[in-house]
Image (tube, grey):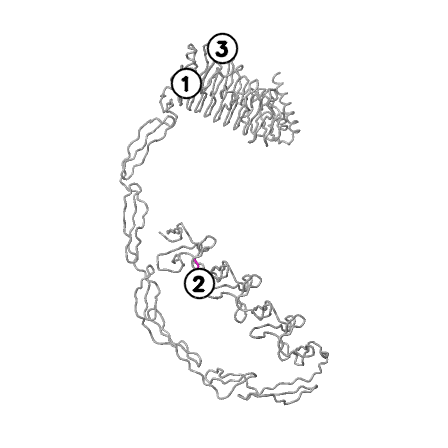
Amino acid sequence: MKKRRVVLRNSMALLLSAVMASSLTPAVALAETDAAGSADSNAVAQADLGAASATTYYEVGTYEKLTEALEGVAVGGTVKLTNDVTASKAITINKSITLDLGTHSITLEKSEDSEEFKYTVGIGNNASVTIKNGKLTGGFKSVVRMLNGANHLTLERVNVESLTNAGGIWDFGTNSFLTLANCTVSGDWFAISHNGSTAPFTLNATKSEITKTGEGVPDACAIYVSANSTNTADGSNNNKINLNGCIVKGPGGIEGKFTDMVLTDCDIMGYATPPSFVQYNNGSTSKGFAVVATDNTLETAPAPRGTITIDGGTYTGLVGLSQYEVACTTYPEFEEATYSIISGKFDHDPKTIKRVTIGENSEVLKDGGLWVVCGHAGKGTTVSGYYPATCGSNGYSGNTVCKFCNKVLSPGYTIPATGEHTYGEWTVTKEATETEAGSQERACSVCGEKETQEIPACGHAPSEGWKSDATDHWKVCEGCGAELEKAAHSFGEWTVTKEATETEPGARERACSVCGATEAEELPALGHKPSASWQSNATDHWKVCEGCGAELERAAHSFGDWTVTKEATEAEPGFRERSCSACGYVQAEEVAKLSPAASIPEGGSGWVETDAGTWGYVDAGEPVEEGWKEVDGSWYYFEEEAMQTGWKEVDGDWYYLNGSGEGTEGSMATGWKQDGEDWYYLEDTGKMATGWQEVEGEWYHLGESGRMDTGWKQDGGAWYYLNGAGEGTEGAMATGWKEVGGKWYYLNKSGAMRSGWQRLGGVWYLLNASHDGTFGAMLEGWQRVDASAGKPTSANSWYYLEPGSGAMAANRWVGGYYVDGSGLWVR
């Protein structure tokens, strides 16, 4: 019948879990999760608690949803927090589940002496509960309360922090288990406590810190675990405390009544001074003890029941009642508990404990203010006092010592001196030159002894090409610049390189057969031979050189007065002519027909087109004969009553007058003007600009002819670059970095090209300072130049410029060479 009831309860639990899960908000996913570790191996059977065929997983972020989830979750399921939760009243968990705090906290906000606020989290109903990954705080009596029954609570990575006058984790169960892993538990009252009215209770803790904090309850110890002779069968079924790698601290460290303890590698402190003890049957009765076993009676002679085993760690405070002299004199017949010390460090002599057993292979040593018990086995060893042998001194292998007590377990041995120096790198003490040897030395890093070595002279390295002057030739040593193989030129025969003409001298040269240097001489010009007769055109006359055809004695015609050869009428034009008195050239021209000028009213103004197709302007009845005239806001220029077009020089300045199809014909142009393939700039006055001109924020250079320049331009000793077609604004002066013909140049804000060493944007660059056809170009690779101007030098002054970027290398190796912070090759 019992088995059938279990099946019924399991079925009802499954149905109830499904119904409650579907009603929760936020929605929770029914997913299979690993509930391993949520139930202790010593837990009672879970049949009476119900079980589901699939575990349930909840994620909640509020107190209300948390309480709903704890009711709805199936046995073995998990509830996980997504936010910090402030509880309105105590939370009790009555089923075997996992509560994952998710790095968040649960806090009981209110604190008053009532059941609803006595604790923050309670464990009941024989449940096996795991709480992990977060913080628990609050509760009037304690943060966590393990209620009546065989409850099993496991805390993993949890910080338990009590209020004033409250404890951390208190247990009131029977056959209950508390397991801590990597936790911090603090209480103003006992950090961990088990009430003595029930037993047994087991505390297992690893790598956890358990502390009695605050002054609210000054007599409390950090861990208090109690029982009595009845519920432990007079000590045969004692409570258990098993600590490994833990820190315990309080006025008293650990006090156990009818409790066995195994303390491994723990640091336990009872810091109250002076220590005290009273025989009492309710609560802790001692202070200033690191570890102590007491009983739970009012008998005049204490008779604690318990076995305490200590293996490793440090214990500050008394250990055992028998180390408290007042207890021994007040209760001379008391019976001490059983203490077994395998190893540990104590600030009181452990041999003074009654009924103490020191490990069979252990010894007691005094180390300053501590008594050290150590058997060495399993404590590990280290080497102390090792120092190596050197070229001139013996070394020592070091002593093997116990890591725990530092006792020398086996001495070391002497290591003989090596006799071999440990030399460092060679350091050049004198640089070798082409004609003199240098030297270098290195030192032993141990004893300082030095070894010196000669560096052979470099010898001259003649240049491949010859240097020369007017009389001699020679080669140059590429290292020191010395002149080598100097000798006089060996010239051959003269060769005419340019024939002399009537107006220009000729030239001849001869070459040295050794170095190829040339010597040149000028051949005088032949001079002109004028023709006997004159040549002429409409304006000038000249003679012609019979040798070269050059024009000679050119001059303007010297005309006499006009002679009318045919009078003009209103129907037909007339003719007139005049002749040059020097060459006899006759100039003839047509005289326009007489015009009644009917289109212009008498005294009026307007444009008049002549029969020849030219335009004139009549101003107030009079024709404009010559000069500038403004008509309808535009300026026009007239000569001999005719409006002019195209380029015109007026008073030494050039102007452009629009032709047909170029705007208003004859009007004066301003701004940019393209004439054929060339561009010109005309100022607001119409005058053609020359030299540097700023137009709309860009600088341009216009030659003496007014034509806009492009490409490289030298002006005042500085070079400038003016953009060509396809390089931005054509003709505009470039600044900053500029790539021209595959090489990079730098032009400052004024447009002037820079050369030599230049620091740009915190980086050094070398711009060619030699006038070798690439003046100003960014150099790359190894360059032999001086440090100031960046010009080629014969000195041993090498720098490395990164290929591609041109940046100077500094403080690093380049291949097998090292350059210092200034970029100079030093080794």
Give the Cα distance between marks 1 and 3.
27 Å
Which region of the structure is painted magenta? Answer: 766-770
Where residue 566 sits, quadrant-wise, is bottom right
- Majority SS type along the magenta span: loop
- 599 sits to left or right of 62: right
* Contact check, label 1 and label 3, Cβ < 8 Å: no
In the image, residue 768 lies in the stretch drawn in magenta: yes
| Secondary element at tag 3 | loop
Give the Cα distance between marks 2 and 1.
93 Å
Q: Which residue does the numbered mark 3 point to in the structure image?
A: 298
- 444 sits to left or right of 718: left
* Contact check, label 2 and label 1, Cβ < 8 Å: no
Where residue 325 sits, quadrant-wise, is top left
Count of numbered circles on the image? 3
Badge 3: how crowded within 10 Å, few (<14), some, or many (20+)? few
User: Residue 775 shows which numbered tag?
Assistant: 2
Which kind of residue does numbered mark 3 sit on?
Leu
Badge 2: how crowded within 10 Å, few (<14), some, or many (20+)? some
| Secondary element at tag 1 | strand
Which of the two discs, 2 and 3, sits closer to the camera? 3
Q: Position of residue 786 (x, y in %)?
A: 38, 58
Q: Residue at x 59, y 72 (%)?
A: 655
